[in-house]
Amino acid sequence: MIQPITALARMSAAAALAATLLAFPAQAQDKPKELKIGIATFLSGPASVFGVPAKAAAEMIAEDLNKKGGIGGVPVSVSFIDEGAGGEALVSNYRRMVQDDKVDVTFAAISSGSCGQLAPLAEDLKMLNLMWDCGASSILEAKKYRYNFRSQANGTPEMLAVLAYLLKTKPDFKTIAVVNQDYAWGRESWEIFSTALKVMKPDVKVVAELFPKFGAPDFSTEISRLLALKPDVVLTTSWGGDLDTLVRQAGQRGLLQQSAFVLGIGESSMQRLGKDLPDGLIIGARGDHWFLHPEMKNDPAFKAFNEAFKAKTGSWPIYSVYHMQQAFSAYQGAVEKAMKANGGKWPSREQVIDAAEGLEFKGWGRGVSLRPEDHQGLEAQIVGVSKTAPGYDFKVLDDMMIFEPKAITTPAGQKSVDWLKTLPPDFVAKLNVQTFKHGG
Amino acid sequence: MSARLLSRWAIVLGVAVAAIFPLVLPSWATLITLILAKGIVVLGIIILLQAGQVSFGHAMFYGVGAYTVAFWERYVGAADLMLFLLLGPVIAMLFGLLIGLFVVRYREIFFGMLNLAFSMVLWSLLEKLYHYTNGADGIRVARPALAGISFSPEAFQYVLLYLTLALVLVVSYAVQRYLDSPLGHMLRAIKSNETRLEYLGISARRILLIGYVASAFLGGLGGVLVAIAQQIATPEFAYWTKSGEFVFIAILGGTANAFGAFAGAAVFETVRFFASAQLANAWQLILGVVLIVIIMFAPNGLIGLLNRRKAGAPS
Amino acid sequence: MSRVLISARGLKIRFGGVIAADGIDLDVIEGENLAIIGPNGAGKTTFLNMATGYLRPQAGTVSYLGRDITALPPRTITKLGIARAFQIPQLFLDQTVMENMMIAAAAQAGSMSAFRHLLDLPQRKEVEDLLDLVGISAYANRKAFELPEGQRKLVDIALALALKPTVLLMDEPTSGVASAEKLGLMDILTAALARQKVSSVFVEHDMDMVERYAHRVAVWSSGKIQVVGPPAEILNNAEVRERVIGI
Amino acid sequence: MDSTIVILAICDGLSYAALVFLVSVGLSLIFGVLRIVNVAHGSLYAYGAYTAATLSLLVAPVSPWLTFPALLVASILVGTVVGGLMERFLLRPVYHLEEVLQLLITFAVFMIMDNLQRMIWGVQPIFAAEPVKLLPNISVLGVNYTSYQVLVLPLVAVATLFGLRYFLRYTLSGAIIMAVTEDREAATAIGIDAKRVFLVTFIIGASLAALGGALASPTTSLVPGMGTDMIVLSFAVAATAGLGQIEGAAVTALVIGLARAFIIYIQPELEVLVPYLIMMIVLLIRPMGLFGVNNVRKI
């Protein structure tokens, strides 16, 4: 046991030294020399399809922010930990980030699993944490947190918007089947969708509920089964390689033509799927953002952002990129609001948190607000259909509807599933939304 | 002899570092707890390696331990840490007995394979039975009270650390005694000559079963500790790569005696910790290379290295 | 009046085309050293395998003190009092000679502790005496794999003796032992057997050994016991000389 | 369960079984000769897939039909280079060590390859479906199948099976490999150059794994970790069949493939369990596997 431990001792003695040198206590009043932002994202594993672009975005945004003088005049620095390294490494690294590197805020994380693991830890460590991408509504519904906020919407409005779009555009379907990844998001999103569907269209028959293993390489059997069952609608909230494979295999075998497909969060796969994605599939954007956002697409800053990202990474931003932007905007908004409240003096973390409650900030869409009661983010939802468009070698969104958050988000203090059961059958009819054409 | 003496000092130093070090760097309290807890699991692997049997499914008992806590909290309610420390290992032991009765009839690769199969079945069930296990995301584990006293997060990580340290000392001592005992030597005899063992009137299967159940117990104990330190239990706990890690750590540290387990765990976790912090996308690579180097140049593991250099032949 | 210890009746076994045993009847009588001689591959070792449950005869029975042991596994038969030494020594190579012996002693005494140190068991003294007796105390703390073939052979036999058997089956006890030491070894061995009142069966190729140490000789060839009798008589039997000994 | 489902399940089971067979037969072959369970076998599968995809995307512009040979080239390339290097420089030096350590070496290789894979091909899913698109769809009872999956894959698997049989039974190198598989000591005793046999066998086995991956690549997205599950599955098949059993692997792969397909129709939740349950039941009844042989140690 000698060698490793002494080695370990040496390393961490160094670490301790470093820590003391680098530590800028973000206590009230005294202005720090830099704001450290610790970000948990997927750098390995399947979900790195979101994590890696988001990392690129974070670096880009931080750089840009510092050019503009940083947050409240303080430059920001970003560091990353890998959600893909597994629960243990994630927790250990998060602790290190908070306790040794003394970050001022953390953005964690993408997977609801990681959020469920890190949110209570952040609470323990009294660390302001923005759940910048994870979608499970339950986290903030089950427990009241002080230090955790969600800087975007959650699964309930996302699914509800998709369902509403389906009911508005294809109201008369009789049968539906679901093919979701077998993990929390896949299960929860279906629970939300099906609960709401039962309320609004009790006559619809669910002919198959398939939950193939997360990361399954092959869906041919599931597809055969769906081809045999011939459901009117097939819903999937899968993403990444799973969704790509499903769509392609289904396309190769004519399933996409046979049944109406709904890709709950398909926006992130459109560029990869290219021409393999047929026109007319219903696609959710997981929020109020899309690189051709009908209300934003002429905003020079927005265009510049997208161009810069395309130049940096070779592809247009996907939702995780915009969620990263929202996290930055939220933090900046909170700090600057707190400063104002603090008479221009540098705010303490507690003051920043007080400011964050009820904060309104703007990402690359309509405004987002952090609900004071339960810290849920209120964000609009874009849903559209895939469409071939000149100038793009992949499908884009058309006939986009933007759903305002108020109506489709679970009220504070209620559990999503219970709330959904209370929705009136004419809920969708009552939702009045604008529809935007691509390029229109 | 001096190798023994050396190991003594190694332990003293190791314990000292494990005990004092986190007071300097709080964030290390949990990491060291993890190292020690995993070391306990690896002790179980080492026991089986005495008999020349490598289990590529041992993580299943680790998983059983972890989920004992998770399920209890989810379906029964909060309970004292002491209860978990008792319950987890015992239930793992029962699993070990059931599965053991089956697998001890096999040797070498088939032994490894069957353990693998069993662990994969457990893993699949944990992943698939979403409504009971919460699937791949696992079940959150709340911080339990110890002997009726509930601690603040900061205090608790130290409580858990020192408790784990104490447990490590106890189980290491017990395992060392076991390995030196008749049963332990008979276990080693399975590796070198099972036929002769039978011709001494000893049932190799029974001997192996005892070792297997003991190692399951340790796996369960480690699982409980890690689940509580991490405040979560996920199917990953039982996945085959996890089993691989444990065997990895055993070989890394050296299987000659109990201390190898902790030496190995310390190196493994520290390397992974720093690697995944500094160069997040190369930590597996680094660990892989470390493993190859160790196997090729120090097949007796770090402990072996220690003994060889400082005291000639390993004990 | 000395009892029949092991009694084989009509043992048959064949491996593919080879008939190793084709109706073997053989008794081992208390207090004797029974030698089995015969050409290589005749099936002598197979007999020991069947007598100790390592192989199942395709027909026939083996009984020990009147109890049918044909279907029993080696460990049970060993427990009944039939110990075995092997042609190729079967040792725990990466443990010391003392540990090898203590394991046997522990097994014999049924002390299956998980906490007492193997080397501190009360049987230690007996084991040391036994090592003295067989003349390998010098090797006590050496790992078994470090020993020369001859010494391993001794340890192998000592292991069997440590079980305090009633009958000891030995497969060519002196093969691999330097011819100069053979006599010495067999003297020690037979003395030990006599002292501990252990009957023995030994498969042997060296006719001097047979002549010196066997009370009875069984000639095994082409799957049958050709003839059984006192050494003097058998070894002078012309047919035996020419078919087995090859003179 | 009506006849439609039976027929559909068979179609689905076949294509799945074909891939599983290719991978596990390679594993089995390697074990038969080297007595090593190659944990990195799944990584070879992944590398086969990625290399095939890369090549396909390269040659597709020239002529889509070139993607078929590309699949083959990729697998041989991976098998020879990766497999060859691995045997020569990582396994050969440790043959004298305990089995555990040899196994661990392959585990280390698995970790390294898994990591390198991310570095080489990145984490974004890669897809190269040319071969599938080139061939027409077939309708079975009104259900569309790609002929690639229901014809090409099974045919390749069958061809491989008979190819291997022929190679092992009727060619010299094959006979030598069989000899080593059946009795290593004897074979080396009569002067067979084990080193060479090991290398050749490992390359063949590795190429088979890579071939499995290459053939899978047109039908699936290539993502990090795609090899990790495959390895355990092929373990299960190889062990169930009896290690070193070529025909056994084929039969077992078929059984597991079909069983899995049926389960997805009847009780999808149990899908993941199927291979392991089958394995355990078989080994319970036949410890050496369906086709394995048990030999008594000589004393």
Image (cartoon, helix red, strand yellow):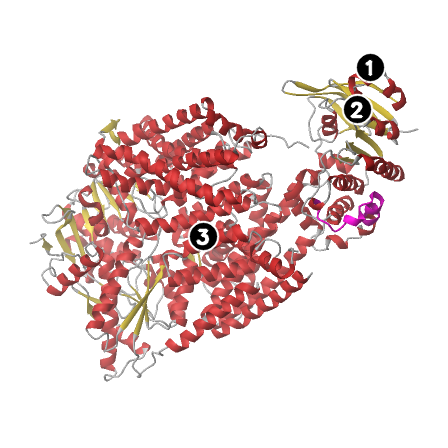
Q: Residue at x 81, y 46 (%)?
A: C131
Q: Residue at x 37, y 60 (%)?
A: B279
Q: Position of residue B106 (x, y in %)?
A: 58, 39
Which residue, given by chain and number where applicable, does mark 1 sit on? C239
Numbered disc 2: secondary structure: strand
Residue type marked 2: Ile
Tell which subunit mark 3 falls on. B
Which residue, given by chain and number where applicable, does mark 2 sit on? C37
Magenta stretch bounds: C127-144
Residue nearest the observer in this picture, B271 or D193 = D193
The 10 Å Cα crowd at callout 1, few under 14, some 14 to 19, many 20 or more, is some
Q: Position of residue B165 (x, y in %)?
A: 57, 65
Asked if badge 2 and badge 1 are on a common chain, one would say yes
Quadrant, the C terminus of chain B: bottom right
Magenta segment's dominant SS is: helix
Residue nearest the observer in this picture, A273 or A340 = A273
Which of label 2 and label 1 is nearer to you? 1
As for residue C136 lying within the magenta part, the answer is: yes
Q: Quadrant of residue D21?
A: top left
- State whether residue B160 is above or below residue A294: below
Tell which subunit mark 2 falls on. C
